[in-house]
Amino acid sequence: MAANLSDSSSGLGSSIPAVEVPEVVISRLPQYVRTLTQLLDAGVEVTNSQQLGAQLQVTPAQIRKDLSYFGRFGKQGRGYRVRRLLTELKQILGLDSEWNVAVVGVGRLGNAILNYPGFNPDGFHLVAAFDNNPNNVGREVGGVSVQPMSVMAETVAARDITIAIVAVPSAHTQSVIDQLVECGVRAILNYAPINAQVPAGVRVRSIDPVLALQSMTYYLTEPERQSNGLHPAG
């Protein structure tokens, strides 16, 4: 069982948690990495849960609880060594490795993804792109040549591609994801507004800006609900 940790614990954490880590905790770890990177770039050598919480808008207790899933961090009265904590979290997330990524679908969204310069510094390399539109096949986008879907399996194997970004219309998303799974891809970022079905051992993360906007409007309308005496049931 993982130890219950705080700034007062000693030693570095373990990259292999003893218990199942909630998805929401995993989703926060990259935010910790980004903040720690910024602190390191600013010359900060030591931080603590209060300082991290203030920057991330997360309570210090939540930060300590999140880190407790992975081991022991920090020293009593001295907080966290920024470089060491950053190194450990990168190992936990696999960010100390290089990852080859394919983009499927080279429409407007796919073009934008391929031309985005922010992937390489974080170890993600866009090395292949696929499309079934003859007008797109053969084009070079963001330094990557667009290939037909028919060569996906051999390219995935040859380029050691483990992650794919799917940017195709909703009607084709499931079939494309099925094809990627058959090729051995085990991590898929999906931009279509569907709940893709995948077998055990394959991870899909869907990004739907409309759903995000719909959740934000809850907070925009909250003052009106309160003024009308409408409150969530307790």
Image (cartoon, rainbow, N blue to C red):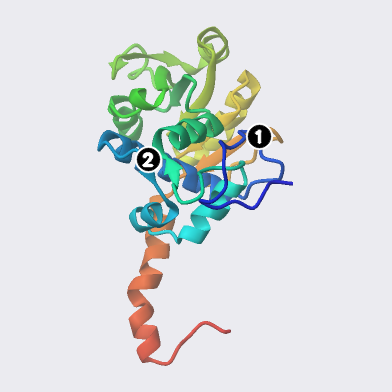
Q: Secondary structure at mark 2?
A: helix
Label located before the other in sequence (1 or 2): 1
Residue depicted at 50% across the width and 10% down the height: 159
Picture layout, residue 59 above or below residue 225 = above
The percent position of residue 129, horizontal first and vertical second, equals: 41, 19
Q: Quadrant of the C terminus?
A: bottom right
Q: Is residue 83 in sight in this rendering?
A: yes
Foreground residue among 71 and 38: 71
Residue 193 appears in the rendering: no
Task: Kindly give the residue lying farthest to the front in the view shown.
Answer: 77
Q: Which residue is drawn at the image coordinates 28% and 26% (left, top)?
A: 117
Distance from the alpha carbon under mark 1 to that under mark 2: 21 Å
Q: How many marks?
A: 2
> Left or right: where does residue 70 sit relative to residue 116?
right
Residue 6, horizontal then vertical, whole percent: 55, 53
User: Which of 31/82 is in front?
Assistant: 82
Q: Position of residue 144 (x, y in %)?
A: 34, 15
Reading the image, the residue beneath label 2 is 36
**Circle 1 sits on which residue?**
16
